[in-house]
Image (spheres, coloured by chain):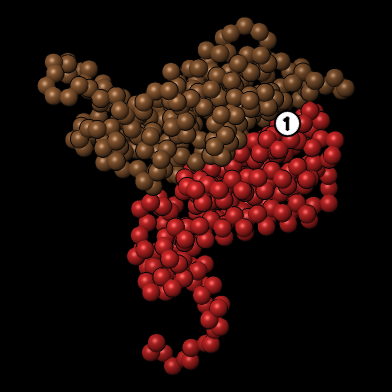
Chain colours: A brown, B red
Amino acid sequence: MTARDRPPISSYRLPRGRHRLPRELVAENHRWRLIGAAAEVMAESGYAGATSKAVARRAGVSAGTFYEHFDDLDACLLATCEMAADSLSDLAAAACTGGGEWPQRLRAAVEAALEYAASEPAFSGLLGFEASGGVAAIATARERLLLRLAGLLCAGRELRLETAGELPPRLELHLLAGAFSVVSARLAEGEVERLASFGGELTEILALPYRRSAVGARR
Amino acid sequence: MASGFDRPVVPTRFLSLHKRRRIAGALAELCTEQGYRTVTVAQVCSRAHVARATYYELFRNMDEVFLATVEAGMGETGQLVEDACLASSGGFQERLRAGLAALLDSVSRRPEMAWVCLVEAPAVVPLGFERHDAAIRHYAGLIQKAAPPAARPPRAAAESVVGGLAAVIRMRVQQGEAAELPALLPELSHFVLVSLHDRFSRTRTPRKTGRAG
């Protein structure tokens, strides 16, 4: 189910009044709602408008409950970003294990990532460069995500012939950061629906440095 | 002042321009130290040595100061980069290198401005984000224009390369390592070349420049 056909995560409330749900389940539900609420608040008002109070209110829990789960707003944002980063990299990694040559697998991974971005705009918005605004927690989560994705992308290096010349050491990180920047800009322009059609172009951008044709046919 | 000197006569326009710059500079420093959202008017005034009344004569609110600061930083660096590109008489690779060198140099000399423009601005929606986006497009356009016609990259590819560079710079600035950016010139210009076209990817960066790490 995507964000477009389900209610916001922050509204996954438990039944009102007295209930006999186990404490762990209630806590799990609160944490989940707080994480969803943090993503929603960030999407609506950015870091400048985000406070732990606003997140708690959106999730429908007390400020006390917020602090049972997180030390402060940044800790909550870090958990939220990590959730988004995990989802995205898991989807991309799963798409990579599908069959086919490297370019096809790359294309599948790119499309899986774009689909996630389109279907979970609040979460994926946290992975764009614009979200951090100097918040170290968000920057850290994103850096870790880039490293994980770079691990997948660098398989492309094996395609190159030995005569092709070296590639810069951190090429994958820079390529991926650029791809995130382009997608962020498109999302900000409200091109969510057309994001899927961007898969081919984005794959081309990521694959170009590794292309066989690039490697010394005319050397 | 109690000193016997006469105050020099300075035109008002110059004074207010000077004060605007001081206020912008003060905000940039405070942002780097503590983050934009916690900066107060009182802090800006005391850091810039202007009266609160002067502040409100020049700006309506903090967001206006912020955007003026972003505009100043982006404009100044953009001009330096463009000048460096134009001054270089070489081909695409030389121009790219000259422009990139100017960019890295400018950031390393004024990391607090880079902090405002690259780290904080995109998070200030919508105007800061739009200004940041416009800068990315501008630099992407410079790359497209400088590239030889046969190797001209499509818009998305050029924007992606610039976005990648911006991310590297942002990360370094955020970690307080802006001073190390100029040393990344060989690696980053190599990154741009291999990302843009097959044609350039066969050209190695000269070995003797080494690779900064």
Residue B51 vs residue A100: left or right? left
Residue B91 vs residue B55: left or right? right
Residue A22 vs residue B55: left or right? left
Q: Residue furthest right?
A: A218
Read off the chain for label 1: B
Quadrant of the rendering where the N terminus of chain B is positioned: bottom left
Give residue A5's position: percent from left, percent from top.
Answer: 43, 23
Say few, some or many: other residues with alpha carbon within 10 Å of mark 1 (under 14 / 14 to 19 / 20 or more).
many
Q: Residue furthest top?
A: A99
Secondary structure found at label 1: helix
Quadrant of the rendering where the C terminus of chain B is positioned: top right
Tell me the residue at 42%/38% (across/down). A43
Task: Determine if residue B15 is in view.
Answer: yes
Q: Nearer the viewer, residue A142 or B149?
A: B149
Give residue A216's position: percent from left, percent from top.
Answer: 82, 21
Give residue B120's position: percent from left, percent from top.
Answer: 47, 48
Q: Nearer the viewer, residue A165 or A176?
A: A176
Q: Is residue B89 above or below residue A20?
A: below
Q: Nearer the viewer, residue A219 or A184?
A: A184
Q: Nearer the viewer, residue B193 or A82?
A: A82
- The residue identified by callout 1 is B194
Tell me the residue at 53%/43% (across/down). B170
